[in-house]
Every structure is written in C-alpha cells, then in structure tokens.
Amino acid sequence: MEISVPPGSAPAGTVFTITPISSRAPGALGTSFRIESSLPLTGPVQVSFKGLGYYGSGLSTSSLGVRFQDSRGFWLPPDAISRDTATDTITATTSHLSDWSLVLDDPPDMEGSFTL
C-alpha cells in the first residue's frame, strides 16, 4: 500500500501514518490499512494498492476494488478509482483518510461445476 501526496495537498510538515489493521471489509484481500495525517488535507491524495500478481480463471486487475470505512463503520467505494493492468495497481483519489482495503470488487460467476 502506498500514499502519494501531490504538492499542495497537505500543509508543510504534515506527517502521515500508515498502520496495518485487521480487515472487516466485505471481500477484503490481505491486510487493510489505517491512514492518518497530523494535519488536515488541503487537496486530494492517491491511495494505491498492489494487485494479487496472479489471477485465476475469471479474475483480473479489473476484478479488484478499493474501499474505505466511513465514520459510521460502513465500507464504501471512493468516488475516483483507476486500474493499471501493466503495473497491477489499483489507485483511489481521495481527500478522505481512514481505514482502507483492497477488495474483490467483481467476483466471477460461480455457476456450473467447480471444485473447492
């Protein structure tokens, strides 16, 4: 997980903290992260997650999404998300810092015969 802070998106001297947390996000993949800043943001930042690296049948980077937890505890999709299949990266643009998670956004259909 990585956060990118463009110039003007945070006051000088802002300290960012990224803490791994146990995820309760529906469809979460791997570790979730709590992102905090010592000063309020003044513009959007990018929160990026690396994809899975390997995708089984019916899955791809397009199957992944990002969720953040709001103040009520609900896991919501950000307004803006981009997927880069070449780098296997999913990036959300946001002005909101809280708990963030990579999720399986578009699971494959489970029809027909399959083995677990």
Image (cartoon, rainbow, N blue to C red):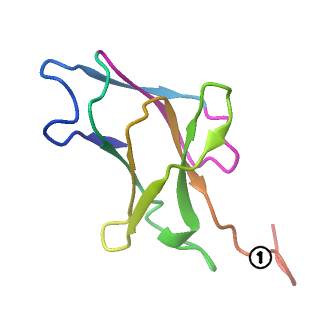
**Residue at (81, 66) in percent of width and height:** 116
Q: Nearer the viewer, residue 101 or 42?
A: 42
Q: Residue furthest right?
A: 112
Q: Main secondary structure of the magenta part?
A: loop
Q: Residue furthest bottom?
A: 112
* Magenta-colored stretch includes residue 1: no
* Magenta-colored stretch includes residue 25: yes
Q: Nearer the viewer, residue 5 or 32?
A: 5
Q: Nearer the viewer, residue 84 or 114?
A: 84
Tell whether 39 sits left or right of 55. left
Name the image quarter holding residue 112. Answer: bottom right
Query: Measured along the vertical axis of the image, is residue 38 above or below residue 19?
Result: above
Per the image, the residue denoted by label 1 is 109
Q: Nearer the viewer, residue 95 or 114?
A: 95
Name the image quarter holding residue 89. Answer: bottom left
Region of the chain picked out in magenta, as a range: 23-38
Q: Position of residue 90 (x, y in %)?
A: 41, 58
Q: Position of residue 114 (x, y in %)?
A: 82, 77
Q: Identify the amino acid type marked 1.
A: Asp
Q: Position of residue 51 (x, y in %)?
A: 44, 59
Element at badge 1?
Answer: loop
**Residue at (27, 37) in percent of width and height:** 43
**Residue at (57, 68) in percent of width and height:** 63
